[in-house]
Amino acid sequence: MKNFKQNLRNKPTLFLIIGIFVLFIGIPFGIYGLTLNGGASLGGVLVLLGVFICIPFLVIDRILVNKIKPFKLSIYELIFLGIVLIFYLSDNKKLYVDLTEYKSEYFVVIYNNGNLKNSELNWSFPLNKNAELNKNSIIIPAEYKGNYQIKLKTPKKWEGWRMNPDRINEISLKIYTNNKTKQNQKEIDSLAKMEIITVGNNVYN
């Protein structure tokens, strides 16, 4: 037991510091979460699950630190965390659209069918994108539909918002509107079609 305590004190590593933090914070928070009612208790389960996942890494860390110098091992662990983070973010990519200063009551996200010109997209760290507006819409490649989550920063004057996925003239789109809009679905679809005609080079009847 004495050797184990000395090992912890004399050979600190990145995983050890993170592991101690997770154990001392995660266990009480997880147990508290289990005491909550309904779906809130699921949060406690997830926190405790994270704690249990952390334990094997701590054990491996203590084994390796006897063979690799702590500083060098911490660098390897940092690289490992970076790789895991990149893989995680590659499956959780986001497309950000800033509408905070937007004036209109509707906004359309159009998925390019190959006949439109895509909106300008800028990279955001590390694998996300920021979209430049084209008046009342943005046009993005169709493959982004399944690969990117759209994160809308809604206009300040909007009282909440709602989104209607739709398909007009073989073009997939999402129509975002002010939650308090009095327009019905037919009127909203008409606005979306007008937007496609404005930004595209297709001919609609």
Image (spheres, helix red, strand yellow):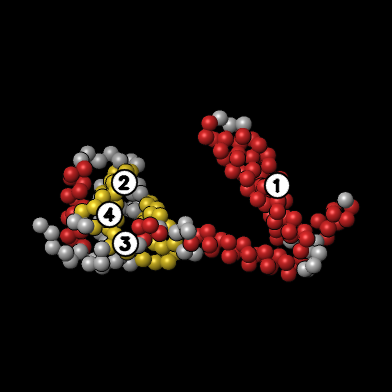
Query: Which amino acid type corresponds to the residue marked 3 in the rendered image?
Result: Ala
Secondary structure type for disc 2: strand
Front: mark 3 or 2: 3
Distance of label 3 from label 4 (alpha carbons) = 9 Å
Quarter holding the C terminus is bottom left
Which label was assigned to residue 163? Answer: 2
Of residues 125 and 100, the one drawn nearer to the viewer in this rendering: 125
Q: Which amino acid does the dot numbered 4 rest on?
A: Leu
- Label 4, on which residue? 173
Q: Earlier in the sequence, mark 1 or mark 4?
A: 1
For the residues bearing labels 3 and 4, Cβ distance under 8 angstroms: no
Q: Is 16 displayed left or right of 170 in the figure?
A: right
Q: Is residue 186 above or below residue 38?
A: below
Tell me if I can see residue 70 in this picture: yes
Whether residue 103 is visible here, answered yes or no, is: no
**Label tally:** 4
Q: Which label is found at residue 88? A: none
